[in-house]
Amino acid sequence: MIAGYYGSGSFAPYSAQAQDLFLETRWDLDDDKWFLRATEKSLGVLVSASAIVSMELYDPGNGTQGTTTNPAGDGNEARGT
């Protein structure tokens, strides 16, 4: 399982030939597989389309506990329990 932040520095192509996904920041997960913190010194993560089985997307502004400032510095926050 890979967790990451998709922001303005991320990239998802729109063609059948290029399907890999670049997440601008990788995130560490806790024991419950929930967002814990941005991986230290992360420069992003490239996810091969062939490795993707499914994806879950979350709005970083809809959490209720454990606010963590987004490492992208764009004012958004990632929240989790």
Image (cartoon, rainbow, N blue to C red):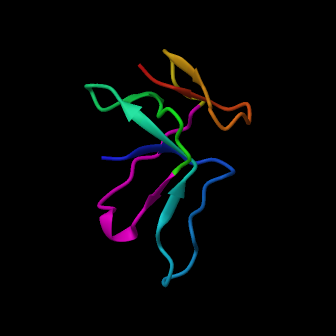
Which image quarter holds the C terminus? top left
Q: Position of residue 30 (x, y in %)?
A: 32, 26
The stretch in magenta equals 45-60
Instruction: Classify residue 51 as left or right of residue 41.
Output: left
Q: Is residue 30 placed above or below 1 in the rendered structure?
A: above
Q: Position of residue 42 (x, y in %)?
A: 52, 41
Residue under the image location 53 percent in, 59 percent down: 22
Residue at the limit of the structure toward the right, as seen here? 74
Residue at the limit of the structure toward the bottom, as seen here? 17
Q: Position of residue 37 (x, y in %)?
A: 47, 27
Q: Position of residue 38 (x, y in %)?
A: 50, 32
Residue under the image location 50 percent in, 32 percent down: 40
Residue at the limit of the structure toward the left, as seen here? 31
Residue at the limit of the structure toward the front, as seen here? 41
Residue under the image location 49 percent in, 40 percent down: 58
Residue under the image location 31 percent in, 64 percent down: 51
How many callouts does the rendering have? 0
Task: Identify the main secondary structure in magenta.
Answer: loop
- Location of residue 31 (image quadrant): top left
- Location of residue 73 (image quadrant): top right
Q: Is residue 54 placed above or below 73 in the rendered structure?
A: below
Q: Is residue 20 placed above or below 23 in the rendered structure?
A: below
Residue 52 magenta: yes
- Location of residue 48 (image quadrant): bottom left
Q: Toward the viewer: 55 or 22?
A: 22
Q: Is residue 73 placed above or below 69 in the rendered structure?
A: below
